Amino acid sequence: MASELHVETLALREQFDTASQQKNASTLGMWIFLITEIMFFGGMFLAYTAYRSWYPNVFGAASRTLNATIGAINTAVLLCSSFTMVLAVRAGQLGKRKAIMIFLSLTMLLGLAFLGIKGYEWWEKFQEHHVPGPSFHMEGTPLQGQAQLFFSLYFAMTGLHALHMVIGVGVMSVLLLQAYRGKYSAEYYTPIDVGGLYWHFVDIIWIYLFPLLYLIDRHGPKP
Amino acid sequence: MSERTEHVDSVLTYAIVWIALLAATALTTAVAYVDLGPFSVVVALFIAVCKMLLVALFFMHVRHSAKLTRLVLLGGLLWLGILITLSMADFLTRGWLGVPGK
């Protein structure tokens, strides 16, 4: 009954009738946030699609300057981090404190590895003068403006993705601390669950970024 | 008090999904070096959608989640579809009709 009073716990706050109702509310809230994130990234995917359809030759040439091998390795690193994240959530479901901490730490390490590899790629771009700005230059095309447009979108999309990763690692360091302090149990592990949803969402964004930026123009028309 | 609605998947299930995701990544990278013409986009996006479904259904527990959550997710994807479809319907068709005097 809704009117009955119950002892307030982390898993069952006063305003909820049952723990599963509270859990569903948290999950739904996170999904609604992720929907806003889909629309946020969706606008950039749209901009990329529109400009690629307008300037296919230069976008193809610019895409071929990216290192697809490093991109593939980074994709694998991120997928591994999603695997360790889901194992952290599973450890939460089973209330295994130590396993939660181990898998959260592994996820953070893999996330930082991704950022390190991404940082190396960006550093390469600076070396090659592929960063939009006064010193920008891409070989093989007189249409430098269109090439800068590709790299502007490249840096905006991979940069915002990386920012989400940094936030994710920050969130996980808080979760790790709270797990260390014994806050989580089989009855209450919602923050780990919801943090996992966020991390997998960031993974899904990269699942689209990787083929669209690196792969689909390997055999495109020459400029 | 409350019924346990949680469904705990086995580590093996997650491991199989993880291996499948890595295999799909290797496949999409390898296929990119084959000249498929305009179909390279189709193949790459098809593999990406498959990977997204694996991550969402298994890692994000959508296959166990409440109907309302699934409805919200589908609603979000619908709005993304509207954004991309209507915008591209504009961008891709601008050259179709001649503009008098241009």
Image: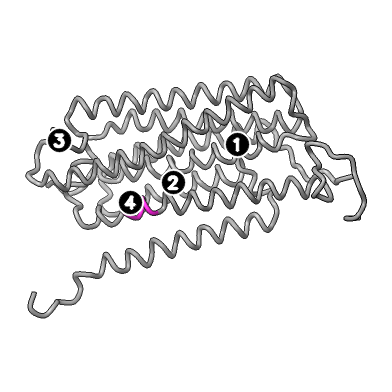
Q: In which quarter of the image is the N terminus of chain B?
A: top right
By secondary structure, the bulk of the magenta-drawn segment is best described as helix
Say what amino acid the circle numbered 1 marks: Gly
Say what amino acid the circle numbered 2 marks: Ala
* Helix, strand or loop under label 4: helix
User: Marks 2 and 1, Cα distance to the nearest angstrom?
Assistant: 20 Å
Q: Residue at x 30, y 46 (%)?
A: A216
User: Marks 4 and 1, Cα distance to the nearest angstrom?
Assistant: 30 Å
Nearest the eye: A43 or A94: A43
Instruction: Please check whether the numbered discs 1 and 3 fall on a single chain.
Output: yes
- Numbered disc in front, either 1 or 3: 3
Please report whichever mark, 4 or 2, sits nearer to the chain's N-terminal start: 4
User: Marks 4 and 2, Cα distance to the nearest angstrom?
Assistant: 10 Å
Q: Does residue A214 appear anywhere in the picture?
A: no
* Placement of A81 over or under A102, stated as above or below: below
Instruction: Write down the residue under mark 3.
Output: A136
Instruction: Write down the residue under mark 4.
Output: B41
* Placement of A193 over or under A21, stated as above or below: above
User: Marks 4 and 3, Cα distance to the nearest angstrom?
Assistant: 28 Å
Q: Which residue is drawn at 41% across and 53% down?
A: A42
Q: Which range of residues does the magenta coloring cover?
A: A43-48
- Numbered disc in front, either 4 or 1: 1
Instruction: Please check whether the numbered discs 2 and 1 fall on a single chain.
Output: no
- Numbered disc in front, either 2 or 1: 1
Q: In which quarter of the image is the C terminus of chain B?
A: bottom left
Circles 2 and 1 in contact, beta carbons < 8 Å = no
Instruction: Write down the residue under mark 2.
Output: B48
Instruction: Please check whether the numbered discs 2 and 3 fall on a single chain.
Output: no
Instruction: Write down the residue under mark 1.
Output: A196
> Where residue A155 appears, x then y in whole percent?
30, 38
Q: Which residue is drawn at 59% across and 31% down?
A: A85
Chain of the residue that carries numbered disc 1 in the rendered image: A
